[in-house]
Image (tube, rainbow, N blue to C red):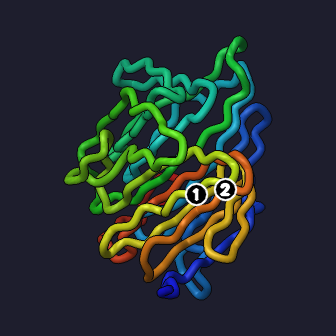
Amino acid sequence: MTQSTTKVHTAPLTDVIRDQGGFRTHFDFPGRNLPGHDDHGYGPLATVVESSLDPGTLIPMHPHRNEEIISWVPAGVMRHDDREGNELDTDPDHLLVMNAGSGFWHEERTLETDPPLRMLQIFVRPRELDLKPGLQHGPVPDPTSGEWRHLFGPEESEAPFTVRNAVDFYDARLEAGTEAEVPTMAGRDSYCYVFEGEVEVGDARLEVGESALLVGGGPEPVRATEESVVVAFLIDPDAPITRQGTIGR
C-alpha cells in the first residue's frame, strides 16, 4: 500500500469574532493552518466567515470592492437588496456570488418570520483590481449524499457559478460511517472546513468550525464519524492576487 504524501495541517475554531447583537461573524483564516505562513489567507482564498443572523435583523446598505463574495446558505434564507435594484433570496436551493470589482453596494436581512440563519460567506481575492462589478444568483444542483457538489470555480471551469481567480468550491453531506475523497486538481491544494458534525482527515479529527489544509499530495478521504456537512476548496496558492478587498484583503 502506497503511503499518502499529503501533508495535513489542521487548525481549531478561531476566536476572531464580531458580535453585533443580531448579527455575529466568526472569521476563519486558511493561511493560518500552514506553519510559518505570513498571510492570513491562502493564495486567492482570503477568509471564510461563518455568519449568523437572528430573525428580524438588517445589515444596512454598505459597499464592497475588489473581492468576490459568495453566500452559501445550507438552511434558512438570506435576503439581499442592492443599488442595482435586485431583491434576491438565497437559501439551500440557491447560491449568491457578488463579484464586487470596482464597487458594489448591498444590504442583507432576515424577516421576523424567518428562522435563525447560519451560513458561510466566502471571500476570494480577484486576479486584478477594479474589475467590472456584477452579481450571480440562481439555483444549485440537488445534493447527493456522499458526493461532492461543485458550486463555483474560475471562469474557465464547469461550475455553475464563477469567481475571478483560481478557487473551486464544493460541499458534501456525509452519513455517519461514510467517506468521500477530497476533490483534487493538478497544481491545487485543498482546504476543508466542517460546518456540521465531525470528520477525520488523515490522522486528524475535526469538529464543527475546525479545518484542514492539504498540501502537496494526492487524494485524501474525509471520513464522517457522525452525520456531517463539509465544504472543500481547491486553491492555486501561486495564482496572482490583489490585496485591497473591503473585508477579505
- In the orientation shown, which residue stands out farthest toward the top? 113
Q: Residues within 10 Å of mark 2 (few under 14, many from 20)?
A: many
Residue 150 coordinates in the image, percent (x, y): 39, 47
What residue is shown at x 45% (from left), y 28% (from top)? 94
- Is label 1 in contact with label 2 (beta carbons under 8 Å)? yes
Above or below for 143 versus 66: above
| Residue position marked by numbered label 2 in the rendering | 224
Above or below for 81 versus 244: above
Q: Amino acid at mark 2?
A: Ala
Nearest the viewer among 142 and 191 is: 142
Residue 68 coordinates in the image, percent (x, y): 39, 49
Residue 180 coordinates in the image, percent (x, y): 52, 57
What residue is shown at x 28% (from left), y 54% (from top)? 154
Res. 73 visible in picture: yes
Res. 196 visible in picture: no
Secondary element under disc 2, as helix, strand or loop, is strand
| Residue position marked by numbered label 1 in the rendering | 179
